[in-house]
Amino acid sequence: MIIKIEKDHSRFRQIVKGTIRKNLKKYISHTEMIGRRGKDLVSIPVPQIDLPHFKYGHKKVGGVGQGDGPPGTPIGSGDQDGGSGEAGNQPGEHLLEVEVSIEELAEILGEELELPRIEPRGKKNIISEKGRYTGIRRAGPESLRHFKRTYREALKRQIVSGTYNHERPVIIPVREDKRFRSWKEQQHPESSAVIVYMMDVSGSMGDEQKELVRIESFWIETWLRSQYDGLQIRYIIHDATAREVDKQTFYHTRESGGTVISSAYDLCNRIIKQEYNPQDWNIYPFHFSDGDNWSGGDTARCMKLLKEDLFPVSNQFSYGQVKSHYGSGQFIKDLSQHLSEEAILVTSEINGKDDILRSIKDFLGKGR
Amino acid sequence: MLPPDLSEIREEIRGHAAAYGLDFFEVIFHILDFNGINEVAAYGGFPTRYPHWRFGMEYDRLSKGYKYGLQKIYEMVINNDPCYAYLLSANQLVDQKIVMAHVYGHCDFFKNNVWFSKTNRKMVNEMANHGVRIRRYMERYGLEKVEAFIDACLSIENLIDYHAPFIQRKEKRGGRALNGEEEVPARVRKFKSKDYMNDFINPREFIDAEMRKLQETMEQKKQFPETPQKDVLRFLIEHAPLENWERDLFSMIREESYYFAPQGQTKIMNEGWATFWHSTIMTQKCLKDSELIDYADHHSGTLGTRPGVINPYKVGLELFRDIEERWNKGRFGKEYEECDNSAEKKKWDRKLGLGREKIFEVRKIYNDITFIDTFLTEEFCEKHKLFTYRFNPQTGVYEIADRDYRKVKAKLLFGLTNFGQPLIYVVEGNYRNRGELLLKHHHEGIGLKQDYARDTLKNLQIIWRRPVYLETVVGEDEVRIGYDGKEIIEEKIGEPEEEKEKAETPS
């Protein structure tokens, strides 16, 4: 069989990326497949291009389903296409529920955004081996016994040998039934990194803006975690003054009052100086704000702090500006005006949820 | 083709299938790994198909689903003589057995169900042929250009008439108005009669009515098309000013559309039938004790239901089982239906044993619509807990609306009619006497997705070249949306009452 799907596949990917057939871009929808990580559901983006057809408008059409419950029972999002599709020719598909690990999530992210792998700096660039459970085998220590597989083998054996009694369904595994998890050694660079998240929590940053920051920082964290063995995260919030807080407070505090950005940079600088030697650590400060600063004088002070203290120690300094109704959005302009020749600075504007992916790519696409 | 162990199993299952009375084309099995099966599946089962990004898209989805362990394809089968079926190499032996039995079920259905009777049984060759031609056009006219035209065609590929393959078409009348001669006005034929009987044998009212009919037909003949055409694709292929390569390409896409149509028309039946037979063959003949657990696991995966979705495998299988039981026990007909003693009905058994015969007949002459309409009973709905659901705008989620079996049936049938797609007809090919195209949406209470409708019009215009219009209903208003190659024009229609009525019932 001639393998030619690659051609069609890469053409599709190019369309999705917007490099060819640009007029199709508006038909791209990002559907998702749902996976599970622990108790949480995660979604895997699956871009689809839906060519326009004459079709029914809203999805409030409803349909037919199967299951328990009196009228009024919510059933979720339903099936929009109810009843269409092709039989026979269409592959028989089963939905399986599978756990997606954080590492896999990071891999999906990296693949989707085509993120380069980070080259850690510093001399501590040692490769270490790390085990990961990837399969099943017949021998192993008791502590790694796979209960479900073992049970299943035992059940099979008992049914075949006729010792299964459905009145008294007791399953007793013997040694041959036992199945154990097996692992593979994987190489991991042993290097450490720290993220310092800084966020403006002054009155003009609303919940919507924080939601953007929260989503974006989750993915940044996920990616960096996949690249570094030990990742520490520090959180700083600031309005007119800055303080270090825990994660919960970071995302949920809302202060009022003015904004003095240099206070945050100052604190960040002190934390790094005291605890993170740039020889041993890969340092990633991220600052999110709506772009308002108290005064031009303070902005000048920020530039100085960045240039003299933070840039020299950081792998990359990232500034994300979210859009708010009140913010002037001035700060990003100041940054690019004064520091545009600094390669270590990456700025990105996040105007809404649709921008998040692009913005993550702005920040992480440099491979630093 | 198959390794010896599988080949042996195939022989065994083929034997069982034939012994049960299944009548199929020969099946050629191929074994593929994941990548291979995803690739074939992406091409809709035809590896030689023409290049197009949407196959790449499908491949992307399938391989992601597999890679992250969310779904996997067990089998594929192609309606062709011989049938081609693909097995996944990583499957356990018991899975392969199930799949083979399932495939023979599909194959029997392809061969015998009447809705498939007009499909091309040499489609594998035909698709390869299409592939060659389209590749040649791509070389000659450029990939981008050909692909863009394919996209425009695909945008309207659903505008076909699913009954068209069964309609005997009259030969085209040649030379209409070509020689400039007027057609001879037809006259009502009178029966021969004696003068004094004439008023009785050829009554005045009758003659007048016939006369009016004739006049109407004459009027209609001036229309183009004479009656609204549901096979929009055919109309366009015949009348749009296309380049030869475009016409050829368009015809291929139409042909493929018609080839796949019966599979959409019989999704529930086809999957139900195949599942019925894999279940029967496995549980009665093939299953070894040691395979029971894996079989049960696989089978329950196939039949799993989720609240908001109808699983065609499940509903189809249960309906076939229900029909078999009812005809075995004589639970049909006047006597049974008029019996209102539920206790008696419950133990009703006339020991007719007609079930098997009945389901073979059903698989031959029904499609999903007639299948559901005829065999979905109140008892069935109750037993299988079917319900209708609706969107609750207050809570923003779908919720169970009703369990009344008539409503369930009506809703199911609505979803199946025309594949749950809006009905669109060509009503004028020479609209405003300017060679413009007018389509009409036969409105049934639900409006079209507006942005998509407009963009579809733009694609239609690419094909028709001249301005195109669609009459539909937006909210409460009848509107005409048009596209002339530059901009979208939308206007309300203010028609007199009579006209409106007539226009709403295309025949």
Image (cartoon, coloured by chain):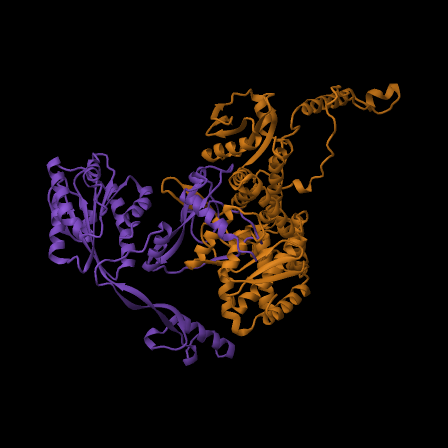
Q: Position of residue B430 (x, y in %)?
A: 61, 24
Residue B446 placement (x, y as % from top left): 49, 35
Q: Decide if residue A206 is on the left or right side of residue B355.
A: left
Q: B322 and B23: which one is in front?
A: B23
Q: Position of residue A67 (x, y in %)?
A: 46, 53
Q: Which chain is purple?
A: A
| x 14%, y 54%: residue | A272
What residue sits 62% from the left and 37% below the top? B247
Q: Quadrant of residue B80?
A: bottom right
Q: Going by the image, does B433 lie left or right of B459?
A: right
Q: Is residue A153 left or right of residue A298?
A: right
Q: Nearer the viewer, residue B54 or B401?
A: B54
Give the vertical position of B251 relative to B465 (above or below).
Answer: below
From where the camera sits, is residue B240 visible?
Answer: yes
Relative to B333, residue B191 above or below: above
Task: Quadrant for the N terminus of chain A, please.
Answer: bottom right
User: Camera-side residue: B430 or B132?
Assistant: B132
Q: Colour of chain B?
A: orange
